[in-house]
Image (tube, grey):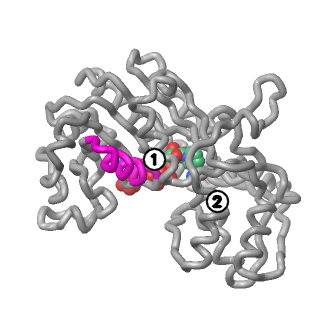
């Protein structure tokens, strides 16, 4: 991994862009990382993406075909768990003006969360300081304001490190992504019921689209009001509940609304059982944590917590961007587009 590998697209950077600032982007292959890379390129930044090599990589593979969503960027491979690799394979001794990280644990298990959400970021920060980078923008999550889960604690621990680092920082804490609220479209299209916890009104959120969030992250580079700030951010429009999401989907597919209620007490039983068994069978410990993540999102709103009332508060949750979740649902249903749900395939 000693030599950086450039995508063919990177050789066509315009002269205009060459006078622009240089951004080193981590997590560029993820949902928001891709959107951020595209927003950066569109706005004329010179973008280097530091990603892990694909599982079966050989030097003859065309990177522009492997990563079409990173067109216009330079791709470098390496290991975020290793500071030497970040310096040698990522920075390559070059100057960067800004670090942006959209890196995140893909599993959410405690071990992976501390490895990626905390330690990999700590490695990146250490290298940024060594290379005298002045600014770092971090994609975090609004749920860290009530940190009950391992991945939230790991994220929060790194947020503290960044705040105390002396770098100009922006910590972006978005509400819910569209992909996380699109897992039941196929169920509804196939005539099945929409699953809700309780009465479907236990929680609400102001979802933000990938593109709007990518652009918001990039706006942190130059907007001094977003410097040295923790920035909760949602999408446009009012907060919506799971019940409203289900109703909209049934309306769009032209079917009679049909809901199935999942009691929270059932999740509690599952979590208790998995936690108890997890002390004997280690694999079940991770399953218990994943079930806890499910319960968290079933019971906690993705809105700013009002410090005075202790309640989630729609009015205190800022909005950015233009696309609403319901417009996205409309596009998905009418064009039969597929959305890459990965771990979000149930809810
Ligand atoms: N889902 C939501 O509704 C929501 C709401 C608010 C905030 N958030 C937060 O937003 C953040 C990003 O979310 P996302 O959906 O864009 O994430 P994602 O699609 O899962 O992408 C994660 C990125 O991190 C990289 N990564 C993970 N483990 C790695 C490892 N061991 N080595 C190298 N790279 C690794 C992935 O690379 P590979 O492609 O190589 O795996 C990918 O680029 C997360 O922190 C999440 O908590 C999510």
Q: Is residue 295 above or below residue 347?
A: above
The residue lying at 63 percent from left, 41 percent from top is: 319
Query: 292 or 303: which is nearer to us?
Result: 303
Point out the residue furthest to the front here.
16
Q: What residue is drawn where x is 38% and y is 29%? A: 136
- Asked if the magenta segment contains residue 36, the reply would be yes
Q: Quadrant of residue 95?
A: top left
Judged left or right of residue 6, residue 82 is: right
Asked if residue 185 is positioned above or below residue 44 in the image, the reply reads: below
In the rendered image, residue 166, in percent from the top left (x then y), is placed at: 40, 15
* Disc with the residue nearer the chain's start (1 vs 2): 1
The residues tagged by marks 1 and 2 sit, at their Cα atoms, a distance apart of 16 Å
- Span shown in magenta: 32-45
**Which quadrant would the C terminus be assigned to in this image?**
bottom right
Q: Which residue is mark 2?
A: 325
Residue designated by label 1? 214
Residue farthest along the right direction in this orientation: 199
> Does the magenta segment cover residue 198?
no
Q: Nearer the viewer, residue 64 or 281?
A: 64
Residue 236 placement (x, y as % from top left): 64, 48
Residue 173 in the image: state x and y as whole percent: 57, 37
Quick one: 116 or 36, which is closer to the camera? 36
């Amino acid at each position: 991994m000693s030599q950086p590998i450039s995508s063919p697209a990177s050789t066509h950077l315009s002269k205009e862009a060459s006078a622009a600032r240089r951004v080193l982007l981590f997590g560029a292959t993820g949902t928001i990382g891709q959107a951020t890379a595209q927003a950066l390129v569109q706005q004329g930044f010179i973008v280097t993406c530091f990603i892990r090599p694909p599982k079966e990589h050989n030097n003859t593979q065309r990177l522009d075909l492997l990563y079409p969503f990173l067109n216009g960027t330079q791709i470098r491979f390496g290991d975020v768990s290793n500071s030497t690799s970040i310096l040698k394979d990522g920075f390559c001794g070059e100057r960067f003006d800004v670090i942006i990280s959209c890196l995140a644990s893909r599993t959410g298990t405690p071990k992976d969360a501390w490895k990626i959400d905390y330690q990999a970021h700590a490695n990146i920060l250490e290298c940024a300081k060594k290379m005298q980078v002045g600014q770092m923008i971090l994609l975090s999550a609004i749920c860290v304001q009530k940190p009950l889960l391992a991945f939230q604690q790991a994220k929060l621990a790194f947020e503290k490190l960044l705040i105390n680092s002396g770098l100009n920082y922006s910590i972006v804490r978005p509400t819910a992504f569209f992909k996380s609220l699109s897992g039941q479209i196929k169920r509804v299209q196939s005539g099945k019921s929409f699953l809700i916890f309780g009465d479907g009104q236990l929680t609400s959120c102001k979802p933000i689209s990938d593109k709007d969030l990518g652009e918001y992250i990039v706006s942190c580079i130059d907007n001094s009001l977003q410097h040295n700030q923790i920035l909760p951010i949602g999408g446009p429009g009012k907060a919506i509940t799971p019940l409203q999401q289900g109703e909209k989907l049934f309306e769009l597919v032209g079917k009679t609304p049909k809901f199935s209620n999942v009691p929270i007490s059932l999740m509690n039983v599952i979590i208790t059982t998995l936690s108890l068994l997890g002390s004997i069978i280690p694999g079940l410990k991770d399953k218990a944590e994943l079930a806890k993540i499910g319960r968290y999102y079933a019971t906690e709103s993705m809105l700013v917590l009002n410090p005075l009332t202790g309640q989630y508060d729609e009015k205190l949750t800022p909005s950015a961007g233009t696309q609403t979740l319901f417009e996205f649902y409309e596009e998905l249903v009418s064009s039969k587009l597929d959305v890459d749900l990965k771990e979000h395939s149930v809810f």
